[in-house]
Image (spheres, rainbow, N blue to C red):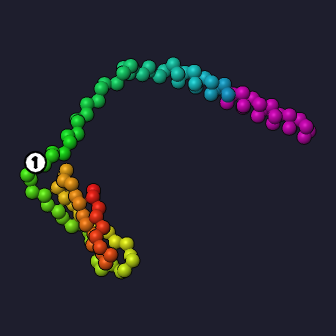
């Protein structure tokens, strides 16, 4: 009796598996047929970009200003410090650092 019951369960599971697979194939077949073809052009339209204009060059006689943005003070002996400044676009900036040993120059 147990053997007969296990055989029926196995056959039922096999039939359900075959039906499941068959319905999947049918679904895939008909879903591909009903899908409308994608009508896109071979090449997308060219995108239009605006060119970035370079910053204007100041005239040679223009006044140059400097703005202090950040400054560390006081500074302990031997410590590292920084200063951030901003100047007119295109201007050459030269700074001089003076310490106890003399002057150290930097050019940016």
At 52% from the left and 22% from the top, the residue drawn is 32
Could you tell whether 30 is left or right of 60 in the image?
A: right
Instruction: Give the image location of residue 9, x and y in percent.
Output: 81, 36
At 18% from the left and 45% from the top, the residue drawn is 55
Instruction: Give the image location of residue 107, x and y in percent.
Output: 27, 58
Crowd class of label 1 (few under 14; some 14 to 19; many from 20; radius 10 Å):
few
Write down the quadrant of residue 94 in the picture.
bottom left
Instruction: Give the image location of residue 62, x and y in percent.
Output: 9, 53
Mark 1 element type = loop
Query: Which residue appears farthest toward the left when viewing the image?
Result: 61
- Residue 6 is inside the magenta segment: yes
> Which residue corresponds to mark 1?
59
Q: Quadrant of the N terminus?
A: top right
Position above or below: 23 against 107: above
Could you tell whether 9 is left or right of 2 in the image?
A: left
Closest to the observer: 39 or 7? 39
Write down the quadrant of residue 97 in the picture.
bottom left
Q: Quadrant of the C terminus?
A: bottom left
At 58% from the left and 25% from the top, the residue drawn is 27
Q: Main secondary structure of the magenta part?
A: helix
Residue 84 visible in the current orientation: no
Instruction: Give the image location of residue 89, x and y in percent.
Output: 19, 52
Q: How many marks?
A: 1
Residue numbers of the magenta segment: 1-20
Position above or below: 17 against 80: above
Closest to the observer: 65 or 11? 65
- Residue 9 is inside the magenta segment: yes
């Amino acid at each position: 009796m147990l053997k007969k019951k296990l055989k029926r369960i196995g056959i039922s599971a096999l039939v359900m598996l075959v039906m499941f697979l068959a319905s999947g194939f049918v679904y895939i077949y008909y879903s591909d047929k009903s899908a409308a073809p994608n009508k896109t052009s071979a090449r997308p339209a060219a995108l239009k970009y605006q060119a970035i204009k370079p910053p204007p060059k100041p005239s040679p006689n223009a006044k140059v200003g400097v703005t202090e943005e950040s400054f560390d003070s006081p500074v302990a002996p031997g410590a590292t410090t920084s200063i951030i400044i901003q100047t007119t676009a295109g201007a050459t900036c030269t700074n001089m650092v003076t310490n106890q040993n003399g002057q150290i120059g930097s050019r940016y």
